[in-house]
Amino acid sequence: MQKKNGIKQAKLEDAKKMLEEGINIETIIKVTGLTKEEILK
């Protein structure tokens, strides 16, 4: 379970960096598999 949380945390960090770089949120969703709500938190 701890590994799963670590992977999700890494994806959230990646999503934050992509947003900062101006990458479209739909693209981020496709790449990370995260939901829009998770990314915008």
Image (cartoon, rainbow, N blue to C red):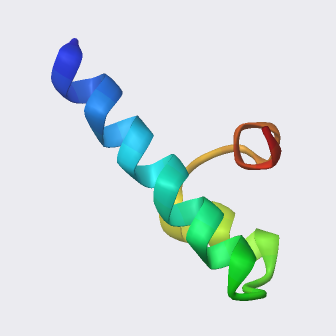
In depth, the one of 28 and 21 nearer the eye is 21
Q: Is residue 14 above or below residue 23?
A: above
In depth, the one of 19 and 27 nearer the eye is 19
Q: How many marks?
A: 0
- Quarter of the picture containing the C terminus is top right
At x 27% / y 26%, what residue is drawn? 4
Q: Find residue 2 and report its image quarter.
A: top left
At x 42% / y 39%, what residue is drawn? 9
Is residue 21 left or right of 10 when viewed as pictured? right
Is residue 11 left or right of 29 when viewed as pictured? left
At x 69% / y 87%, what residue is drawn? 21
Is residue 39 in view?
A: yes
- Quarter of the picture containing the N terminus is top left
| Residue 7 horizontal/vertical position (percent) | 30, 40
| Residue 20 horizontal/vertical position (percent) | 72, 77
Is residue 27 in view?
A: no
Q: Is residue 1 above or below residue 15?
A: above
